[in-house]
Amino acid sequence: MFSILIALIYISFISLGLPDSLLGSAWPVMRLDFGAEIPLAGAISMTISGGTIISSLLSDRLTRKLGPGLVNAASVGLTALALLGFSFSSKVWMLFLWAIPYGLGAGAVDAALNNFAAIHCSSRQMSWLHCFWGVGASISPYIMSFSLSGQRGWSGGYFAVSMIQFTLCVILFATLPIWKKAVPAKAAAASSTAKPVGIRAALKIPGVPFVLFSFFAYCALEAVAGLWASTYLAEYRGVPGETAAMFGSLFYLGITFGRFVNGFIADRYGDRKMIRIGGIAICIGLVMIMLPLKTDVLALAGLMVIGIGGAPIYPCIIHSTPDNFGAENSQAIVGIQMACAYSGSSLMPPLFGILARHISAGLYPWFMAIFIVLMLVSTETLNRRKKIGK
């Protein structure tokens, strides 16, 4: 029964990834239809992330009360509804309106599923689960590119993904009884009756601020990389919009491939080493994009290398949370981690949009370089403190 539950969680991670790369791949065309400036994509992304921050911080209470299965199914349904709203939007204010449920649907389920997997799954399983997030994030730009090239427009791409989400929502609601059967009754009862840790108490746990800051930095990098890849290719390198949308997915393809490979080696090397290796790979990918060459081949390969480098970082930080801070505290800390992740995702993309508008989109790799340095400093500081503490 537990293997069936794991399969459902794999499906849920695909659902989590599907919406994440849509805005970035569609925006070069969307903004022309709305007569909008480049930085507006960052503002929409920030609105989505604002919803995820709120629901992430509430995830500990929601999950203890409703259970991860119901939180998962309801959140996917809310996201599907928001995507459908995007597809029918004809004014910019409509995008901001639907961005609210878009974000609220993502935050709680992200925290609930990640904490469940961190406690009940190995590092290998965690990597493969996040690989399936990458599958969803890699598929949606191709759906959008196909819709743009087939004259269905960006709205057709959003509509297609919303239908996929609605289908997944039906499957998840229909299989809710499996959660109760697969999770031991004693563990479920203990989880539901335990008192929520609370944000203040969680922040007082030694080492938590460092992991939160590292999450902020990495997710800022990931959000900027995914959201602005197509715009960087189109606006700075002169790649056509449809082609930029397709090649912008190379970053997500790199994450997907990297997490698949990471699953075979994560248990052997451990979370800390995999985070370190991933950070070094990201630095290499950024250098490949920075090199002032006439050909775009190395820059496109660099996007994939950055994705491969980022592959182990997110799942390994999450998976190490119960070990670093205790399983009894992990749901609250993972929820705060998600809030910090989406804070980075919401604040940094619009900031880069402003820089791209007033200076140049060519700042794209240099902007990301700041965050990989900050992330590596934070994670290494946490590792040293935990080592001293032991």
Image: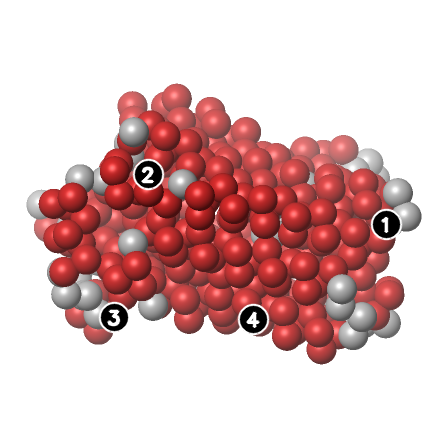
Secondary element under disc 1, as helix, strand or loop, is loop
Residue 32 position in % (x across, y down) = 86, 64
Q: Earlier in the sequence, mark 2 or mark 4?
A: 4
Q: Spatial distance from mark 2 to mark 1, Cα to Cα? A: 39 Å
Q: Residues within 10 Å of mark 2 (few under 14, many from 20)?
A: some
Three-letter code, disc 2 = Ile
What residue is rendered at 46% in x and 24% in y? 261
Q: Where residue 216 sits in the image (x, y, percent)?
A: 43, 60
Q: In the rendered structure, which disc, 3 or 2, sits on the residue that comes first in sequence?
A: 2
**Which mark identifies residue 178?**
2
Mark before the other along the chain sequence, 2 or 1:
1
Q: Residue at x 71, y 47 (%)?
A: 160
Observer-side mark, 1 or 3, equals 1
Q: Nearer the viewer, residue 19 or 315?
A: 19
Residue to which mark 3 is pinned: 199
* Foreground tag (2 vs 1): 2
Say above or below: 131 vs 109: above
SS at circle 3: helix
Q: CA distance from mark 3 to mark 2?
A: 31 Å
Q: Which residue position is annotated with label 1?
A: 152
Q: Quadrant of the C terminus?
A: top left
Q: Amino acid at mark 1?
A: Arg
In front: label 2 or label 4: 2
Up the image or down, 285 lies above or below 153; here it is above
User: From the viewer's perspective, is 53 left or right of 321?
Assistant: right
Distance between the Cα atoms at labels 2 and 4?
A: 30 Å
What is the C-alpha distance between the residues marked 4 and 1? 25 Å
387 shown above or below 39: above
- Mark on residue 100? 4
All told, the count of numbered labels is 4
Label 4: state its secondary structure. Answer: helix
